[in-house]
Image (spheres, rainbow, N blue to C red):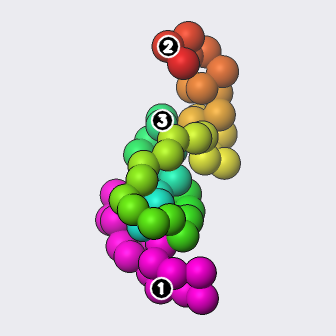
Amino acid sequence: MSSRSLTVLLSAEGPHLGHLICKSCGDVIDTLPTSGYKKLYSTCDNEDCKLDSRFSYDD
């Protein structure tokens, strides 16, 4: 899945309107089947993002 492109995927659970986004680089990490559009933030596996999130105190 390309960076910063929000696509709707269909599965047996329904449409994937939930997007898990890296709070450091903004890449879409995964999609989730949700009943409405949702943006959730986490940290991806990129080493720079992991290091950046360790020193971020605004959580």
What segment is highlighted magenta in the picture?
1-16
Disc 3 crowd rating (10 Å Cα; few below 14, some 14-19, many 20+) is some
Q: Residue 21 magenta-drawn?
A: no
Which mark is on residue 10? Answer: 1
Q: Residue 11 magenta-drawn?
A: yes
Which mark is on residue 24? Answer: 3
Which mark is on residue 58? Answer: 2
**Spatial distance from mark 1 to mark 3, Cα to Cα?**
27 Å
Q: Is residue 52 above or below residue 28?
A: above
Which residue is found at the position 52% from the left and 53% from the top?
Answer: 20
Question: Type of residue at label 2?
Answer: Asp
The image quadrant of residue 4 is bottom left
Disc count in the image? 3
Which residue is found at the position 46% from the left and 58% from the top?
Answer: 19
| Mark closest to the chain's N terminus, 2 or 1 | 1
**In terms of secondary structure, where does tag 3 sit?**
loop
Magenta: main secondary structure:
loop
Q: Nearer the viewer, mark 3 or mark 2?
A: 2
Residue 31, given in percent of the width and then of the height, sits at 52, 65
Mark 2 in CB contact with mark 1 (< 8 angstroms): no
| Mark closest to the chain's N terminus, 3 or 2 | 3
**In terms of secondary structure, where does tag 1 sit?**
strand
* Residue 37 visible in the displayed image: yes
**Residue 10 left/right relative to 42:** left
Disc 1 crowd rating (10 Å Cα; few below 14, some 14-19, many 20+) is few
Q: Nearer the viewer, mark 2 or mark 1?
A: 1
Question: Type of residue at label 1?
Answer: Leu
